[in-house]
Amino acid sequence: MSFVVVPRFKLTDQRLDAFLEAAQNDASRSLADEAGCHQFDICVDRSSQPVEVLFYEVYADRSAFEAHLRTAHVAAFRAAILSGEEGPVQFFDRAAA
C-alpha cells in the first residue's frame, strides 16, 4: 500500500507562474532523485479566485514522504513560496492504483 499526500495552495494570478516554476522543480527533483516518490502531479484550477493548486504525491510509504521533506529541493520550494499560500494537507493510504 502506498502513501498519498495532497497539499493545496491558493494563489493570486500574479504569483501563479513563479509558484508553478518552483513546484515543477520540486516535482521533477522528487521523481528523479527519490526512489520512494512514485508520482507527483501538479493540478491547477484557474477558474477559482484565488487560483487553486493541488499536488497529488504518491510515496512508497510514510517514511519515504518524511525523507522527501528533508531534501534540498523541498527547502528551495518552501523558500520560493509565500506564507499563507499553503492550505490544508491531506494524507491517504492508497488502496488501489
Image: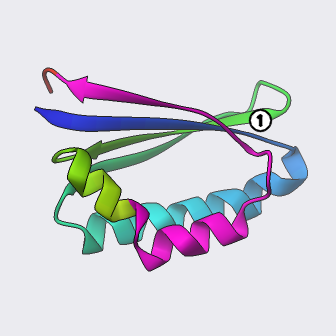
Give the quarter of the image for residue 11.
top right
* Residue at 38% across, 72% down: 29
The color scheme shown is rainbow
Q: Residue furthest bottom?
A: 72
**19 lies left or right of 42:** right
| Residue drawn where x is 23% and y is 26% of the image | 93
Q: Is residue 83 magenta?
A: yes
The residue under label 1 is: 51
Tell me the element at label 1: strand
Q: In the picture shown, does residue 52 fall above or below 16?
A: above
Going 76% across and 45% down the picture, which residue do you hit?
85
- Give the position of the C terminus as an image quadrant: top left
Three-letter amino acid code at the position of disc 1: Val
User: Does any portion of residue 44 appear in the rendered image?
Assistant: yes
The verdict on residue 73 being magenta is yes
Q: Quadrant of the N terminus?
A: top left
Q: Position of residue 66 (x, y in %)?
A: 33, 56
The reply, left or right, for residue 3 in relation to residue 42 is left
Q: Which residues are magenta?
A: 69-94
